[in-house]
Image (spheres, rainbow, N blue to C red):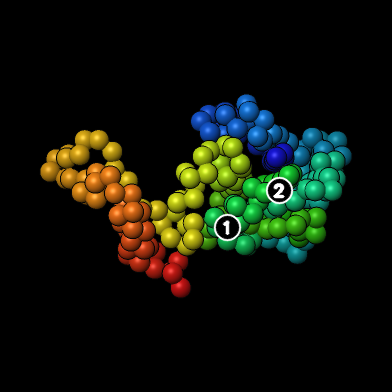
Amino acid sequence: MIIDILTLFPEMYNGVFTESIIKRAVEEDKVKINIHNFRDYSTDPHHKVDDTPYGGGAGMVLTCQPIFDCVKNLRKENSKVILLTPDGVLYKEKMAYDLSQEKHLILICGHYEGFDERIRSICDLEISIGDYVLTGGEIPSMVLVDSIVRLIPGVIEEESHLNDSFNDNLLDYPTYTKPRVYEGMEVPEVLVSGDHKRINEFRENERLKRTKERRPDLLD
């Protein structure tokens, strides 16, 4: 998979994709992540990428030209262009699974007061990571990359994400490790019983119980 990220602040990504699982995925050629400063595509003599909004109002608006030209340069037949925006579709685990099957993702990070509405015309999908506003699309793009890359085949063991929270609309079951007793709190007996059928039943019951208690909306 190739992931191209369009941003005005490439330095924000320093270190984010060079640690842990994503670093290993890059080193093993499971994914290639490219950061592009779309200011480099501006035809303005001063590399300007924003301007005042028609009709008045506060803030500056990202202009079409730099982003259009950057996407045109990167886009291929199998590319999916995604705009990170607060009014996009709410991001969920099912979307991460679907996007992990793509060959090429182009992520556009908005900034300032917003972007020219016509930029939506070159996007295949608009995504929001939550009902709140951030200073830009950089952090959402990091969220998408992290959640997608771990699902690429071979990046982590399949079993590790099959029981993840939100898989099958259920939260994950509780896990424990040594020691068996810590400050009076004991590991459930079933988990040390060696009876894998009982363990699986316990875990599935705990997933359902935890979801009912903490996120009943997932069961609707």
Amino acid residing under circle 1: Lys
Distance, label 2 to label 1, CA atoms, is 13 Å
Q: Are marks 2 and 1 in contact (CB under 8 Å)?
A: no
**Number of numbered tags placed on the structure image:** 2
Q: Which mark is residue 176?
A: none
Q: Which residue is mark 1?
A: 94
The reply to whether residue 76 is visible in this rendering is yes
Q: Which residue is mark 2?
A: 102
The percent position of residue 181, horizontal first and vertical second, equals 17, 40
* Residue 88 versus residue 135 in the image, above or below: below
The percent position of residue 65, horizontal first and vertical second, equals 84, 47
Disc 2 residue crowd, few under 14, some 14–19, many 20+, Cα 10 Å: some
Residue extending farthest top:
27
* Residue 187 versus residue 167 in the image, above or below: above
Q: Residue at x 24, y 46 (%)?
A: 193
Q: Nearer the viewer, residue 52 or 73?
A: 73
Residue extending farthest left:
184
